[in-house]
Image (cartoon, rainbow, N blue to C red):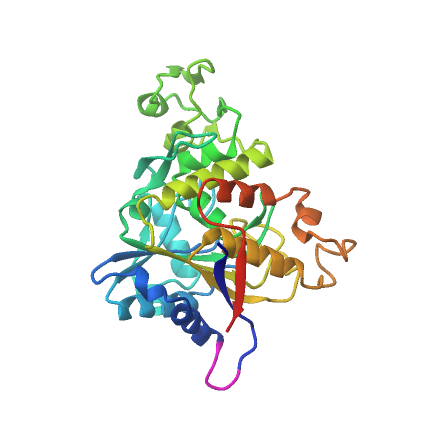
Amino acid sequence: MAAEVFWADMRTEKGKNLVDKVAALWRKAGFQRAIAPEDLVAIKIHFGERGNLAYINAVFARRVVELVKASRGKPFLTDSNTLYVGSRSNAVDHLQTAIENGFAYAVAGAPLIIADGLKGKDYYEVPVNGRHFQQVKISSAIYHADSMVVMSHFKGHELTSFGGTIKNLGMGCGSPSGKQMMHSDVLPEVQEEKCIGCGRCRRWCPAGAITVNEKASINAELCIGCGECTVTCPERAIKASFKSDPVVLQEKIVEFARGALKDKENKCVFFNFVTHVAPECDCNSWNDAAIIPDVGILASWDPVALDQASFDLANAQPALPGTRLDGHEGVKDKFLAISGYDGTPLLKYAEEMGLGTREYNLIKI
C-alpha cells in the first residue's frame, strides 16, 4: 500500500512562514501520535561540519522541540561522532561545533547529547540479519530513546549519489567503528610514521589481531574489520579506509538504518528538507552552490517513501546555472550525473529490508 508523504513548498505569506509550515506538516501527518507522555525523544539532526552552511537551520529544530514538548515528550537534539578527522570526531569538538552552528540551548530549547559518547565508543550491537551484517553498532542514545524525530537535509553525496532520511538513520546513527564497517571492504592500515607504539589499539582489538613491537601491526587473517582501532588510536595512526563498492555501501547503510529503527515501530517520524540541495555531503567543511531551486519540506511516517518522493521532486526541478549541473541540463537523474553513482539501490534494498515502501501518495498542504 502506498505511503502518505506530505509536502509544504517554499511559498510563504503573512501568518504562514516556513517554520509554521513545519508545525502544519506535523499536525497533518499526525506525528504527535508517535510520542507518549514522558518519552525521551531523540531529534536526530546533522549539526553541520564547521564551515558548511547547508545544514538545517536550528530554528526549525526549535519548532520541532516545541511540538514534542506539546505532546509532553522530553526532547534532546542528537547526532553521532564521525569516523574522519574533523570538527565532530569527539563529543567535545562536536558539541562546540553544534553550538557555533546555532544549536545552543538558548536557540533550540533542548539539550544536546552526542549519541555515542565522548569518543564514539558508547553503542549497542543490534541484530539485523542483513545481507552484509548480522548485527550493527547503533549509538546508545539512539538505542535508548523512546521515540525519534529524524530531521534530514536532502542533498547530493559523493558515494551514495544522494543523502536523505535513510542515510541520516544508517550512517548518522552508527558509531564511528560502525561507520568504518559501512565504508570499507578494505582493512585498516597502520601509518608507522605516526604510530608511537602505545598499545592502546591492541588492548581494544576484539579479535586479537594487533601486535605491537615498537610499532603496531595488524594481522589481516585475524582482523574482522570492526574499525575499533581507527577510533581508539590517540595519534590517528591507523588509517580508516573509505574504499567500498557503492552498491554495497548503500546496502550496508540500509542495514544500519534497520538497526536504528529496531523496536521503535510507530515511534519514529521523518522530515526531509529539500532545500539548498548541494551536490555533496554536509560532512564536508564547505558546501557548493545549490544545484536546483528549493523544493520545500516533506514529512512522512515512512522513510523509504519520503526519500523516494524527495528524489523524484528534486529530479523534476530545473538545473540551476553556474552549478555542478552545468553541462548536465536535461538529465533524468541529476545526482547520478554529478556523482557518477546510482542511488536507487539504496531505496530498493530499504524496501526489501522492510523499512518502508517506494510507493507513495504526495499530499501538498
Q: Residue at x 37, y 44 (%)?
A: 260
Residue at the farthest left position: 38
Q: Residue 325: give x, y in percent of width and height.
A: 72, 55
Residue 111, by quadrant, is bottom left
Q: Residue at x 43, y 43 (%)?
A: 257
Note whether residue 183 is visible.
Answer: yes
Residue placed at 53% from the left, 25% from the top? 186
- Name the one closer to the observer, 89 or 348: 348
Q: Position of residue 65 (x, y in %)?
A: 33, 66
Task: Determine whether, in the image, residue 334 is placed left or right of residue 58.
Answer: right
Task: Confirm whether residue 287 shows in the render.
Answer: no
In this view of the protein, which residue sits in the foreground, 123 or 191? 123
Query: Percent position (x, y) of residue 278?
Result: 60, 57
Within the image, what quadrant is residue 210 found in?
Answer: top left
Question: What residue is rendered at 37% in x and 46% in y?
Answer: 261
State which region is magenta: 13-17
Say above or below: 281 vs 10.
above
In the figure, is residue 274 to the left or right of 141? Answer: right
State the predominant SS element of the stretch in magenta.
Answer: loop
Task: Name the residue at the right extreme.
Answer: 327
333 relative to 317, above or below: above
Q: Nearer the viewer, residue 267 or 279?
A: 267
Left/right of residue 142 with respect to residue 59 in the rendered view: left
